[in-house]
Image (spheres, grey):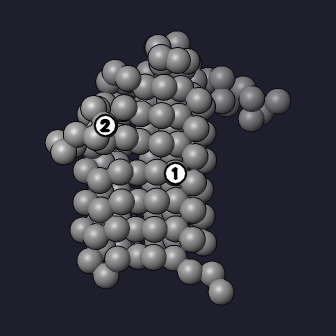
Amino acid sequence: MVTNFVSEKARIGKNVKIWHFAYVGDDTEIGDNVKIGSLAHVDYNVKIGENTMIEGMVYIPPLSRIGKNVFIGPAASLTNDPYPTSTKMIGVTIEDGAVIGSRAVIKAGVTVGRNSVVAMGAVVTKDVPPDTVVAGVPARARYSREEYDRKKKAWESS
């Protein structure tokens, strides 16, 4: 028997798909047409905008705010405690249209700007401006979102 735990206090939109062994905590709001992969952990007091895809094994801590049309790749980890084990927490903000690559780690309090891309494995310790691609440890700007989209289109057409 496959089970999920979705809190009765969570507000779930229409056409939301939550896959095997996922967790959704209290006071979380999930917009329409969201997909949450297997083994994902969406903690309490999280907001997720419509048309967002969260892949398997992603951790989204309390106080995180995720916009519309966001993609979060497998095993990405957001944090909410800049000084573990502090009692004061701050979430991560991921704005509309952002892409977070597999196994990226994003520090508490960081904002990933609209339409930005965080490369797989990046460690994001500072805010990411809109329309920017960051990569590395620590993550640094590599090129614009416009250039990323050109490279993606070329890859897909070859």
Q: Which of marks 2 and 1 is nearer the N terminus?
A: 1
Please tell me which residue is depicted at 30% across the width and 48% down the height of the picture. 64
Query: Can the viewer see residue 42?
Result: yes
> Does the CB distance between marks 2 and 1 fall below 8 Å?
no
Q: Which residue lies furthest to the front in this view?
A: 85
Residue 134 % position (x, y): 49, 20
Q: Which residue lies furthest to the bottom in this view?
A: 1
With 97 as the anchor, is 122 left or right in this view? right
Q: Which amino acid does label 2 sit on?
A: Pro
Q: Mark 2 points at which residue?
A: 84
Question: Counting other residues with Cα less than 10 Å from the Cα at mark 1, is it few (<14), some (14-19), or many (20 or more)?
Answer: many
Residue 135 appears at what percent x and percent y? 54, 20
- Rounded to the nearest whole Å, what is the CA distance between mark 2 and mark 1? 20 Å
Q: Which residue is drawn at 60% across and 64% down?
A: 38
- Give the image location of residue 111, x and y in percent: 30, 32
Judged by depth in the image, the label closer to the viewer, 2 or 1, is: 2
Q: Residue furthest right?
A: 158
Q: Is the residue 70 above or below the residue 84 in the image?
A: below
Camera-side residue of 153 and 6: 6
On screen, residue 22 above or below 43: below
Mark linked to residue 146? none
Residue designated by label 1 = 58
Please give the name of the residue rendered at 34% of the width and 21% of the height, measured from the top-left corner: 126
Q: Position of residue 46 (x, y in %)?
A: 30, 57
- Tell which of 17 and 77 is nearer to you: 77
Residue drawn at x 32%, y 24% is 127
User: SS at mark 2?
Assistant: loop
Amino acid tagged 1: Val
Q: In the picture, which quadrant includes the N terminus?
A: bottom right
